[in-house]
Image (spheres, grey):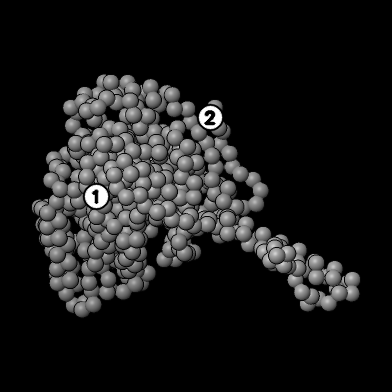
Amino acid sequence: APLARLTMAGDFGDSDFISFSAEKKDEEEEELEDENESMSENEVVPWMREQTSMDSPLISLHNEILSLCDLLLPTAAEKEARQDVVEWITEFITEKVWPKEEEVCVSVFGSELTKLALPASDVDLVVLGLGARETMGKKHLFKLEAALRESGQVDFIEVVSKARIPLVKVRHEETKVHLDISFGQPGGLETGALVNKFLSHLPPMRPLILVLKLFMVQRQLNETFLGGVGSFLLQLMTISFLQHHNTRSMHQQAQNPSQHAKRHHHNRRYQETQGVQNNLGSLLLDWLELYGRKFSYERVGISIRNNGSYFPKRTRGWLNFNRQYLLSMENPMDTSIDIGRNSYNISQIVEVFGHAHDRLVAQLHAASKWKEGHTRSILAVILNPQDPMLADRHLPLKHVFNTWIDPHHTASGEHSSNPSGTSRVRSRLKLPPPSSSGEAQAIKSQGSAQGGPAKKKKPRKKTVHQQEQQLKKKKAKRNKKNKKEKKRLSAGYPVESRPSPSKKQRAANSK
C-alpha cells in the first residue's frame, strides 16, 4: 500500500532530513508497456549504441548515460568556433571599446570553464578591471551595446539591466554562438575553480550533471529568473548527493550487501550491479528519488562544505513561513547567501523529479522482460530523443566517457560464461576498487569455476558499531573490577591485592 507523506518528529537527527512517500507503479508500468508496444524498434535514439546484453537493465541504463554524454560533447568544429568568438570579443572589448584601460580583461567562467556545457549553452564572460560593479553603475552595459551594434558582427543583442547580475546577451552572426557578458563579478571564476575541484574528486559528477542539465533544459526548468534551478544550484545539489551517497549509502552497502540488495530488489535490481560502486543508472535513480521523493525541503538546508552536511533551516533564519517549500542551499563561497531562495517553482520541479524516477523504475521493470536482441532505450522515457539540440549530432567512434560496463567480460578481459552475474567495469576514470563483500564472493566463486587459485579470506574489518560495542564491554568490565576493589577496601583488605589466578594458572597449579 502506498505510504502517505511523512515528516519525522522529535529531535532533529538524520531522520528529520527525509520525508518518505511512495507511489503506485501499476499505472506507470501499463502506460510504458503501451508506449513500448507502439514504439518502433528502429526508432532513432541518437545516443543508443549496440548493447551487449539485456540481462541487466540497470547496466544498460548506465551505458546509455555514457553514450548520451559522448553525444553531448562538443565537436572539434564547435570548440574552434567558440574559441574564435571568445578571442574576437576579448579583442573587441580591450582594444576598441576600452582601449585606454590597461587593466581591463575578459575571462571565461560558468559551464565553458568547467566543461559542463550543452551544445546550445551560452558562453559566460566577465569583464574585469573597470572598477567594482557597485560603483560602475550600468553605463558599461549600454556602452558595450552601442559598440556591438555598430560593429555589425552580431545579429541579436539585449541588455538585461534589472537582473541581480546585469549583463549583455549577444549572438554572434557568423557562428550563432550566444554570449552572456557581465561586469565586475570575479566570483564566477572562484566558483568555477571550486566546481572543477569537485569534478576531479567525484568522477560520476560530470556525466550525472550533463544528463540532469539536458533533463532540465528540455522542460525549461533551468532559468533562475523564472523560478527554475540554475546550473550552479544543480551542480551543488549533485555534489551534496554524491557526498552523502559515498559516506552513508555505500558504507551501509559494504557492511551488509545482501540486506542492501534485498531492500532494493523490488525497484532497483541492485543485486545485478552490486559490485559496481559508481553505476550511473543507480546514481541517477537515487538522485531523482532523493530530491523528488525523500528530501524534506520544509525543514532542511544543504551545505557542501566540510564533506557535506545538512542543517535546520530555522537556525540560519532561512525558513520562509510563506514559502516553506523553498530549497535552501548554502553558497560555499559566501555562507550568508542562500542560492536556492530564487527557485520559487521548486515544488513543481520536485514533482517532475519524482515522476521521472517512477517512469525510470517502471521502464527498468519492463526492460527485464524484453526479449534478447530487442534493445530499446531506457533513458528515452525521461528525455526527448527528438530534441532539436540533438539533431545532426553523431556519436564518436570511440567512447569518451569510458566507464562502460560489459556484463560479458571479466576484469582480465576474458569472456565469461555467466553474463548475468557480477559485472566488471573497464574504467579509465580511475574509479575506486569495489568494496562490496558480495562482489568479492562472486569474484572468488567465478575464479574457482575457471580453475584459478582460491584466494585467502581476509579478516573482516570491524564496523563502527562493532567497535563501539567492544569499547562498551571493556568499560563495563573495568567498572565491575573497580566495584570489587571498593568492596575489598571496605572489608579491610588491601587495595593492591594479588589478582585471582586465571584458568590456565589454576590448571598449572593443579598439575
Q: Is residue 462 visible?
A: yes
Decide: few, some or many residues near mark 2? Use Cα within 10 Å; few <14, some 14-19, many ≥20: few
| Percent coordinates x, y for residue 341 in the rendering | 46, 53
Label 2, on which residue? 2
Label 1, on which residue? 412
Q: Describe the element under mark 1 as helix, strand or loop.
A: loop
In the rendered image of this protein, does residue 391 appear above or below residue 144? above
Q: Amino acid at mark 1?
A: Ser
* Location of residue 357 (image quadrant): top left
Q: How many marks?
A: 2
Specify the farthest residue to the right: 491
Decide: few, some or many residues near mark 1? Use Cα within 10 Å; few <14, some 14-19, many ≥20: few
Residue at 88 percent across and 72 percent down: it is 490
Residue at 34 percent across and 67 percent down: it is 190
* Location of residue 292 (image quadrant): top left
Residue at 19 percent across and 38 percent down: it is 49
Q: Amino acid at mark 2?
A: Pro
Q: Describe the element under mark 2 as helix, strand or loop.
A: loop
